[in-house]
Amino acid sequence: MPHIPETIGQKPLSFDAPDQSLRANRIDLLKSFTRLFKDDGCPEDKVIDDFMRDFEHTKLLNEVLGDMPEAKRKEVLRGAARCHVASFGRGRDFLAVRNQLHLVGQDCVTLFGTLPASLRQTMLAHAYVGDRGQIVLESPDVGLSIPLGRTLLGNGDGALTTHEVRELLMFPENACHWRLEIFSAKLRHFSEGALDAESCHVWVDLIDRYIDGKPIVEFSEDKGVLEALAYTLKKLAERASVLERREEFPISRMLTNSAEAYFLAQDHPACGAALLTLATFYARKLESDLAAGASTLAASVLARDALQRWEDGRYGSAIGSYGMAMGAYTGSGVLQGIRSAPLAPRSGVVDEIVPLPTLVEHTSQSDFEAAWDGRWETTKGVRSQSVLDLRVLEIERRFAKLTAKPSESNTSN
């Protein structure tokens, strides 16, 4: 039978090498192919096609597949090849063009289910976030990669257990930060459109499996983790909203949970911003009552934040929250005057209406403006002194620079 080509972008490897077994040779061939994707590499379509065609004949996974019937063995190996290619951004593009990316989810379940429990545990423990946000599980012995698929996060045969889901999302990557935090950080640097629909679905499903219907307050007591959760959900919702099949995503739930997580992390401006994004989402669907509710809650959160920041002497950020609050009050008033379109029939959990969390008591616009005006007047002297202090510091800084120049000149002489 043919095997993986011995020349994949590098000098041919010799099967006759005295210090290298056939198995080690095959592993080297796979690693050679993998290196083509590293550092934004872009292997040609023909190279990927050849790899996928030839991999179904490899004996690299003989120990795992055992005495599996030949037809089933080839099917698993074809899926394994797709999984490995889909572990890289360039490979995902390749499969998407050929309408094969959607097959990877089932391939992942089939292949992962053939692995011994000890190897599964090792791969989950060393999972990493890929260049398109995909979660990659890598076999440490042969270097074969598997991108986590949605089917593996379901409730069917071969799906991850609750413990495995928790380990995958919350255990530290490289003993540093939780994978959710790693993904949140990478999201800030991804180019527009870098996340494909499948990667978005996987992260949404993974978070949903972890939450399992429990209140967001039970997700974590760690402020950093809550901020990562909030940011991730908001960015995933924004990405999903521009996808062709955006109705498949629970966007209202994602934004609602994001707002609550931000609130629990004590980032009230970000909480208000998430609620305003939710209001915009509802408004675009002509659900003005729901939009007005989200905008009203945002206004109350931001109003209280503005007043508290003023009390703490953080005048600049207080004014920022004040501006956001007034914008939310205005938007809420406009939305309340618009008649909502009849709600379309809803089914399942994807498009469900999620009740807004009770974050703060309602603060009317008139009460907020009265409280704001009172604080503005009583702190006029403090604000003036703060401005004067800043001016004095600036003058001292400039004077220090001027006096330092002659001494620097003398030193150089």
Image (cartoon, rainbow, N blue to C red):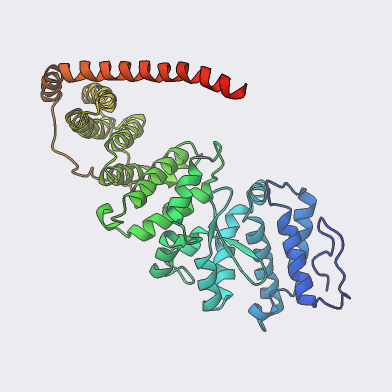
Residue 338 falls in image quadrant: top left
Query: Is residue 202 rendered to the left or right of residue 362?
Result: right
Residue 222 visible to the viewer: yes
Residue 138 falls in image quadrant: bottom right
Residue at 51% over, 67% down: 124
Residue at 54% over, 22% down: 408
Number of on-image labels: 0
Q: Is residue 332 above or below residue 53?
A: above
**Quarter of the image containing the C terminus?**
top right
Residue at 49% over, 43% down: 187
Across and down, in percent, residue 35 comes to 72, 56
Across and down, in percent, residue 302 comes to 23, 31
Query: Is residue 166 rendered to the left or right of residue 218?
Result: right
Query: Is residue 103 rendered to the left or right of residue 49?
Result: left
Across and down, in percent, residue 229 comes to 37, 49
Residue 339 visible to the viewer: no
Residue nearer the viewer, 209 or 377? 377
Residue at the far bottom: name it: 67
Across and down, in percent, residue 317 comes to 28, 27
Residue 210 falls in image quadrant: bottom left
Residue at 52% over, 40% down: 189
**Quarter of the image containing the N terminus?**
bottom right
